Image: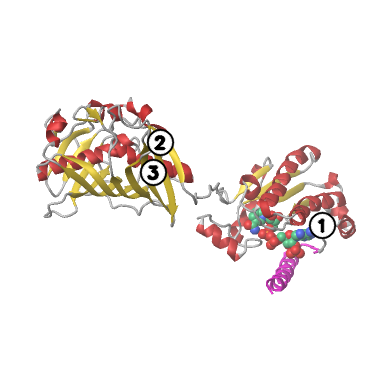
Amino acid sequence: MGRLAADVTGGREIRATLDALRTAGSEAAYLAVDITDQAATTAALAPHRDRVTGLVHGAGVLADQLIAHKKASEIERVFAPKLAGLRSVLAALPAERLRHVVLFSSVAGFFGNQGQSDYAMANEVLNTWAASARRMLPGARVTSLNWGAWDSGMVSPQIKAVFEERGIPLIQAPEGARLFAGQFAPERAADTVTVLGPTTPLSSRERPAPTSVATVRRSLTELAGTLLVTDHRIDSVPVLPAAVAIGWALGAVEHAEGRRAVRLRDFSVHKGIVFDGTGPDECRVVMTPADGEVTVAVRSVTKDGTVRPHYAATVLAGPAPAPAAPLTGLPAPGGGADAAGLYEDGTLFHGPALRGLRRVLADEEARLVLECEPVATDAGPADASWYAAGPADLLLQAALVWVRRFRSAAGLPLAVGGVELHAPLTSPGTFLVVVEPVRRDGPDSRLTVTACAPDGRVLARFTDVSVVSAPQLAAKFTG
Ligand SMILES: NC(=O)c1ccc[n+]([C@@H]2O[C@H](COP(=O)([O-])OP(=O)(O)OC[C@H]3O[C@@H](n4cnc5c(N)ncnc54)[C@H](OP(=O)(O)O)[C@@H]3O)[C@@H](O)[C@H]2O)c1
C-alpha cells in the first residue's frame, strides 16, 4: 500500500513538474528506465544524447542493516543504482558535451552511519569518482553533493523520528531546492565534494553498555606518593580522601561505557583506606550494571583472600542533570574572614596542597559561604572528565567546617546522597562553596553543598552529605 501510494503521488509530482516547466517555456521529456540496465539506458537516451549537456545523478536505494546481517544481494541492490547506474548513464552520453555533472551523495558516506555501510561506501565512491572526473572531464563542473538528511524522499517517518530524537535537523524541501540551485553559482564552481545541510553526523560511535560485571584496578601504591594522599593525614596517617573514591566510581563507569558520567547517588564509606604500611596495594572497582544504572563497589583483597568493602555508590545513566537555578544573594569574593585558621584549629586536617578554602564569606547556619581556589588535582586519569578529586574535596571540607561551627564537632564525611556535575569541576578558577543544612533543627547534619562560580552559576552539587562526628577527632586533626 505504501509503495502504491508513493507511485501515485510520485506520478502526480512528475506531471505537475513537467507542466510547470512547459508553462515556463521549457521543453522536458521524462524517461523512466532502470539505469542499472546498460542497454535499456543507452536506448532510452539515444534520441536525446546529442543535446544533453548536464547530468544530475539522484538514483539511490537503501537496505539498512547492521553489517553482520547484510546479505550480498542487498549490498548489490544498494550499490547498483549509484555505481552501475552512473556508469551506464555516462556511457550513454557523449562525455565531451557535458558541462555539469552533479551527483547526489550523502553525509552517510562522508561521516558513516549505523546500518548503512553499503550505502556509505556507494556514496563515498561517488565522492572519489567526482574528484577523478574533474580531470577526466575538464570541460565540466563535477560536484558530489553530500546531502544531510531531507524531510522527504527515502527518509521515512520512522527514520525521521530517529533523527529528531538525536536532535539532527532535517532539510526541508524549499531549503534543499535553494541549496541545489545555489550550487550552480559561479562561486561554487570549484566545489568537487561538498556537504549540504546540517553537518551533524547521522550517528555517533556507540559503545555497548556493559551488561555484565566489570572490574578495574586502582593502584594504591602509585597513589600513596601523591599530594592528595600525603597531605590528607589524620593523626599523622595518610587516608584516602572520599573525594578520590567518588572520582573512581564516576571515572570507571565513564571509561567502561564511553559516556560522560555526571550523576551519582548513594555514595557511602564502609571503611576508609589508610596508608599505614599494612594496607592493600590496590583496590578493585567493581561495576554491576542494573536498570540503566551501575552500582560500584570499591573493595580490596587482603593477602589471605579476605575481601574488604571500602566504598559503594551508584552511577546514574542518562543525560546531564536538569539545569540548576543559579544561586542568588551570594557575597562577593575577597570579603569576609581569612579561612587559614580552619586548618590549624582542629576543624580541618588537610596539608598545604589541599588547603583550598581561602575565605569565609558568610558564616551563618542557614548558609555558610566559602571562597575557594582550586587545589591539587593529581588523582590522575582515573577521574571522570568533569570531575577532579582536588576541587571536589573542597566541597567535603566545607561540610566539615559547617559541622564544626554549628554542631561544635570535628567530623569526617560518611555518605553523600547525590552528586551532580553541571560543568567541569576540573579547573574551576576561583569558586564559591555554599553549605546549607537540609533541616535546620535536627541533630543530624545532612547538608547540601554547592560549588558555584562567583556569579552563582552552579558547577557541582553534593546533596544529603552526612558527616560523622566524634569528640576525639579534633585532637587527631591537629596531631
Ligand atoms: N533523502 C535524503 O535524506 C537523502 C540524503 C542524502 C542523500 N540522498 C540521496 O539523494 C538521492 C535521492 O534520494 P531521495 O530521498 O529522493 O530518495 P527516493 O525518494 O527513494 O528517490 C530515489 C530515486 O532513485 C530512483 N532509482 C532507484 N534505483 C533506480 C534505478 N535502478 N534506475 C533508475 N532510477 C532508480 C527511484 O526511482 P523509482 O521511484 O522509480 O524506484 C527514485 O526516484 C539518492 O541518491 C540519495 O542517496 C538523499
Q: Which residue is mark 2?
A: 382
Q: Is residue 382 magenta?
A: no
Q: Quadrant of the N terminus?
A: bottom right
Q: Which mark is on residue 250?
A: 3
Q: Secondary structure at mark 2?
A: helix
* Residue bounds of the magenta highlight: 1-30
Q: Quadrant of the C terminus?
A: top left
**Looking at mark 1, is its residue's CB closer than 8 Å to ligand 1?**
yes
Q: Hey, what amino acid is under mark 3?
A: Leu
Q: Is residue 201 left or right of residue 308?
A: right
Magenta residues, dominant SS class? helix
Residue 395 position (above or below residue 437)? above
Q: Earlier in the sequence, mark 3 or mark 1?
A: 1
Q: Position of residue 305 (x, y in %)?
A: 39, 37
Q: Residue furthest left?
A: 408
Q: Residues within 10 Å of mark 1 (few under 14, many from 20)?
A: many
Q: Hey, what amino acid is under mark 2?
A: Ala
- Specify the quadrant of the image occupied by residue 386: top left
